[in-house]
């Protein structure tokens, strides 16, 4: 039989933006023969996330990420349905996920590497396991809980950059749920700002592309910023950090504005001085350091969803052939909420 797949055609280089020519859609012969323990799965959903930009760089080798290889099938977090099985743990019809799912319409996977999902926990919306009940939701909740130091009743103000993205849109809501008095979102369009305040309960939302961000943020946070959930880095973060209080906390989740530049991502001297002088905590948040909290955090997230306290927004693109385009669009802020590719119907 034939399958469609996407491979890495070329690397963009460290200091350049990825382009469509870096990806290639292929049709290839596919053998369905299974060894013991393996399953044949049809791909349903693929996740595209900012961290994948690192997977395009050979220089990222040695980090906790696997590096994409030239002319080989790409991979990211994904979900599929089992169509054949030689695994004792999985049967035909099971919905499964893997953090390194191939960008391919069908694939043979080691059953021991797959996580079986329960569609009933998400009312059949299994794509939520890539966002709300996946690494996206876990990053938002555990990141704030571990590094945000929210104190209910302390009248704290939290600022979220990249607030209309997958993690940011959840982080703002979770900040309120954990006890923040005010949550301010920073994003890139007026449409996103309106969505954050009208749909997700952000107290204010600021478009960083409009003039006067420094002054507008000061007006929203007249007493300063207690917690900053940072998804973007760069100039936006310099502005937020300049308004953070003494002994405040920065959750360093992502630096998407810097991902097309050469690491390490250095801070401006003025920002470095502010962090030191005000004793602001700032350390990289890595979700894999908190695997012991995944079960309890997932339970908390699902409880909030069932109670109507937490909303998940998804931007879904259809067709494997559009996966690279979805990734490139997400890197430039083309999504609201979690960016997902639906490859096939369940």
Image (tube, grey):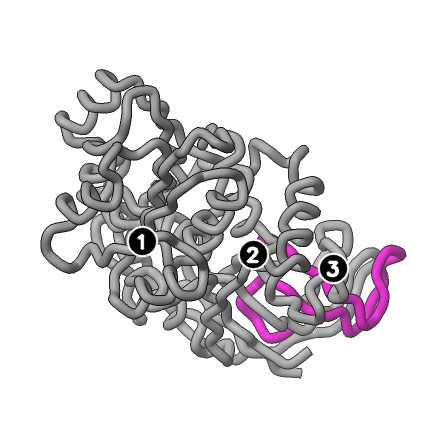
The residue lying at 57 percent from left, 63 percent from top is 102
Q: Quadrant of the N terminus?
A: bottom right
Which residue is tagged 2?
310
Q: Is residue 94 magenta?
A: yes
Q: Residues within 10 Å of mark 2 (few under 14, many from 20)?
A: some
Q: Residue 164, position in %: x, y? A: 37, 59
The residue lying at 26 percent from left, 49 percent from top is 257
> Are dots 2 and 3 in contact, CB under 8 Å?
no
Q: Quadrant of the C terminus?
A: bottom right
The Cα–Cα distance between marks 1 and 2, rounded to whole angstroms, is: 18 Å
Q: Which mark is residue 117?
A: 3
Q: For the residue labelled by badge 1, is the local secondary structure a helix, a strand or a loop?
A: strand
Q: Which sits in the foreground, 294 or 93? A: 294
Q: Nearer the viewer, mark 2 or mark 3?
A: 2
The residue lying at 36 percent from left, 52 percent from top is 203
Q: Which mark is residue 204?
A: 1
Vertical order, 307 against 4 (above or below): above
Q: For the residue labelled by badge 2, is the local secondary structure a helix, a strand or a loop?
A: loop
Looking at the rendering, the stretch of residues picked out in magenta corresponds to 79-106
> Are dots 1 and 3 in contact, CB under 8 Å?
no
Can the viewer see residue 49 in this picture?
no
For this view, does 80 lie left or right of residue 271?
Answer: right
Q: Residue 218, position in %: x, y? A: 19, 41
Q: For the residue labelled by badge 3, is the local secondary structure a helix, a strand or a loop?
A: loop
Q: Which sits in the foreground, 310 or 18? A: 310
């Amino acid at each position: 039989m034939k399958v469609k797949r996407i491979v890495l055609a070329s690397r963009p280089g460290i200091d350049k933006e990825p382009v469509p020519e870096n990806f290639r859609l292929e049709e290839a012969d596919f053998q369905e023969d299974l060894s013991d323990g393996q399953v044949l799965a049809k791909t349903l959903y693929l996740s595209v996330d900012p961290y994948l930009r690192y997977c395009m760089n050979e220089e990222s080798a040695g980090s906790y990420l696997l590096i994409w290889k030239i002319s080989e099938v790409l991979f990211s977090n994904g979900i599929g349905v089992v169509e054949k099985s030689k695994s004792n743990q999985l049967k035909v019809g099971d919905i499964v996920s893997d953090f390194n799912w191939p960008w391919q319409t069908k694939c043979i996977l080691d059953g021991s590497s797959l996580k079986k999902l329960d569609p009933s926990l998400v009312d059949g919306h299994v794509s939520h396991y890539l966002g709300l009940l996946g690494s996206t939701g876990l990053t938002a909740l555990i990141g704030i809980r571990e590094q945000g130091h929210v104190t209910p009743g302390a009248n704290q103000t939290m600022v979220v950059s990249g607030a209309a993205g997958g993690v940011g849109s959840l982080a703002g809501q979770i900040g309120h749920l954990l006890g923040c008095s005010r949550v301010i979102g920073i994003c890139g369009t007026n449409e996103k700002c309106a969505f954050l305040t009208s749909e997700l309960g952000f107290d204010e939302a600021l478009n960083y592309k409009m003039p006067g961000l420094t002054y507008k943020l000061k007006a929203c946070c007249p007493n300063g910023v207690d917690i900053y959930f940072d998804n973007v880095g760069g100039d936006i973060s310099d502005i937020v950090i300049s308004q953070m209080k003494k002994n405040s906390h920065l959750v360093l989740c992502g630096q998407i504005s810097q991902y097309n530049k050469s690491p390490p991502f250095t801070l401006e001297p003025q920002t470095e001085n502010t962090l030191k002088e005000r004793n602001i905590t700032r350390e990289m948040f890595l979700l894999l350091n908190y695997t012991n909290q995944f079960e309890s955090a997932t339970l908390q997230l699902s409880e909030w969803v069932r109670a109507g306290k937490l909303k998940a927004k998804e931007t879904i693109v259809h067709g494997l052939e559009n996966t690279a385009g979805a990734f490139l669009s997400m890197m430039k802020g083309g999504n609201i909420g979690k960016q997902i590719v639906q490859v096939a119907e369940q």
